[in-house]
């Protein structure tokens, strides 16, 4: 359990002014804070209407006070929350009084959550899920974050860790008691059979990393095509506001423009790019280079062609969604398109959104949301797989060396939840949080 000598405080609700302001205080001086600032005693874990005062007895506000004695609190320490009126002056006055008390200081970003981790209240996966839950903007981001913050993924990793520990225990029992009837020589066969199955499970889990990345960071959709094909108009129509400048002049878009879209609860990051053509104009050439780079990094390319103009003979990526624009005009192109649209009449826009959603769901199949989402998770899972495989294939080496490989696999797995060797990651992880969390 962590030992913290300082008591921290911060506004844990939204920015003021607001209807309500929640100021959280955590640490060894909480009892002193309540004795000085709260008009009368507060029973644990229940809301109490109290007058909040300065040490000189001046009234700051009337509000609800909640007291959570440690270790049964979010941080594992004594915690008190003041639920006050959300005016700037109220919060400022309470802050000023708290800062005047000995041993108190304002919390840094993520410091309450860091204390929860170091006091064993939450593991790193639950902490990361909490950060994602606070920042979630779409329904699928909320579901994914909830899976993490409620311990769903931690439970899965813990079950794998227990299998690795059991495998090591059986191997070490065979090493220590080779002649005992209770530890038959065939025990190794059982261990390696289970380790082979475990590698398969972890590899399948790691294969879902792309789905996790798409849900958490967004499905990258790049709109590409010739100049004046209607790319910028399409982007504006999809997000229902003017993001990109639209003119009849070819080459208007010079850079990659980005905006977010919510399709079926998924975050879709939409990119408008410069028209693809040969040009000697320096700025436009750079825009086209960026457009091609964006296409290479995209999860989906929406390749736009003007059906009222001669057919574009350039080759779109084979996986691209081909969209024919300006369907309200007489068609010249005879090419087959996945979707035909008109920005002027809005024809086909709903079908296009549906087509993008279908492509997205092909990459995020229906399954449990206990999936990896961060590079650090993926790296540790890959390291775990390599260590187990090394133990399995090296059947010609001593058992104690193979058991050491299983220990290294367990260490890699434990690094994800924060059970081992994560001190260098903590500043990065908790730096994602807002002040007050």
Image (cartoon, grey):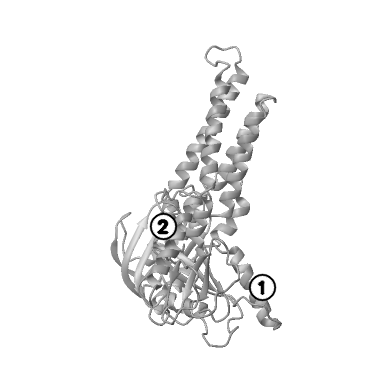
Residue nearest the viewer, comparing 40 with 343: 343
Query: Tag 2's secondary structure?
Result: strand
At horizontal 39% and vertical 52% (from top left) the residue drawn is 69
Quadrant housing residue 394: top right
Task: In the rendered view, tell whether residue 285 sits above or below residue 418.
Answer: below
Measured as percent of width and height from the top left, residue 359 is found at 46, 60
- The numbered disc on residue 79 is 2
Q: CA distance from mark 2 to mark 1?
A: 55 Å
Q: Which residue is mark 1?
A: 289
At horizontal 51% and vertical 45% (from top left) the residue drawn is 205
Residue nearest the viewer, comparing 344 with 61: 344
Measured as percent of width and height from the top left, residue 272 is found at 54, 75
At horizontal 48% and vertical 67% (from top left) the residue drawn is 336
The answer to which of marks 2 and 1 sits earlier in the sequence is: 2
Measured as percent of width and height from the top left, residue 2 is found at 53, 49
Quadrant housing residue 92: bottom left
Q: Closer to the camera: disc 2 or disc 1?
A: 1
Q: Is residue 105 visible?
A: no
Residue nearest the viewer, comparing 248 with 215: 248
Measured as percent of width and height from the top left, residue 268 is found at 47, 66
Task: In the rendered view, tell whether residue 109 sits above or below residue 149.
Answer: below
Q: Characterize the local packing of mark 1: few (<14), some (14-19) or many (20 or more) Cα atoms within 10 angstroms.
A: some
Relative to 252, is 328 on the left or the right?
A: left
């Amino acid at each position: 359990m962590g030992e913290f000598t300082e008591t921290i405080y911060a506004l844990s609700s939204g920015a003021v002014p607001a209807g309500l302001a929640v100021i959280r205080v955590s640490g060894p001086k909480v009892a002193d804070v309540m004795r000085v600032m709260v008009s009368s005693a507060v029973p644990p874990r229940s809301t109490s209407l109290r007058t909040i005062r300065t040490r000189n007895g001046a009234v700051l506000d009337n509000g609800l006070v909640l007291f959570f004695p440690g270790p049964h609190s979010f941080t594992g320490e004594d915690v008190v929350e003041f639920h006050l009126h959300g005016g700037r002056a109220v919060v400022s006055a309470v802050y000023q009084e708290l800062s005047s008390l000995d041993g108190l200081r304002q919390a840094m970003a993520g410091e309450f959550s860091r204390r929860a981790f170091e006091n064993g209240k939450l593991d790193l996966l639950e902490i990361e899920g909490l950060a994602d839950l606070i920042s979630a903007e779409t329904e699928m981001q909320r579901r994914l974050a909830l899976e993490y913050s409620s311990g769903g993924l931690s439970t899965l990793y813990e079950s794998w860790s227990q299998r690795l520990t059991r495998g090591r225990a059986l191997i070490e029992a065979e090493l220590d008691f080779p002649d005992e009837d209770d530890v038959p020589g065939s025990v190794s066969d059982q261990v390696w059979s289970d380790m082979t199955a475990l590698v398969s499970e972890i590899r399948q889990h790691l294969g879902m990393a792309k789905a996790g990345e798409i849900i958490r960071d967004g499905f990258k959709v790049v709109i590409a095509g010739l100049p004046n094909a209607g790319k910028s108009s399409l982007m504006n129509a999809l997000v229902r506001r003017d993001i990109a400048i639209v003119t009849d002049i070819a080459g208007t878009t010079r850079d990659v423009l980005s905006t977010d879209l919510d399709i079926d609860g998924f975050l879709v990051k939409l990119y408008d790019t410069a028209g693809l053509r040969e040009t000697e104009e320096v700025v436009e050439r750079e825009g086209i280079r960026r457009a091609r780079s964006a296409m290479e990094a995209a999860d989906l390319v929406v390749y736009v062609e003007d059906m009222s103009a001669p057919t574009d003979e350039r080759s779109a990526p084979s996986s691209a969604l081909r969209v024919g624009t300006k369907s309200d005009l007489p068609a010249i192109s005879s090419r087959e398109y996945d979707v035909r649209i008109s920005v002027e009449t809005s024809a086909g826009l709903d079908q296009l959104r549906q087509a993008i959603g279908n492509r997205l769901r092909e990459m995020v199949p229906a399954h449990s949301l206990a999936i990896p989402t961060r590079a650090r998770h993926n790296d540790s899972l890959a390291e775990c797989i390599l260590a187990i495989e090394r133990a399995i294939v090296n059947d010609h080496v001593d058992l104690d060396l193979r058991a050491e490989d299983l220990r290294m696999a367990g260490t890699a797995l434990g690094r994800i939840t924060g059970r081992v060797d994560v001190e260098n990651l903590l500043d990065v992880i908790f730096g994602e949080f807002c002040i007050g969390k």
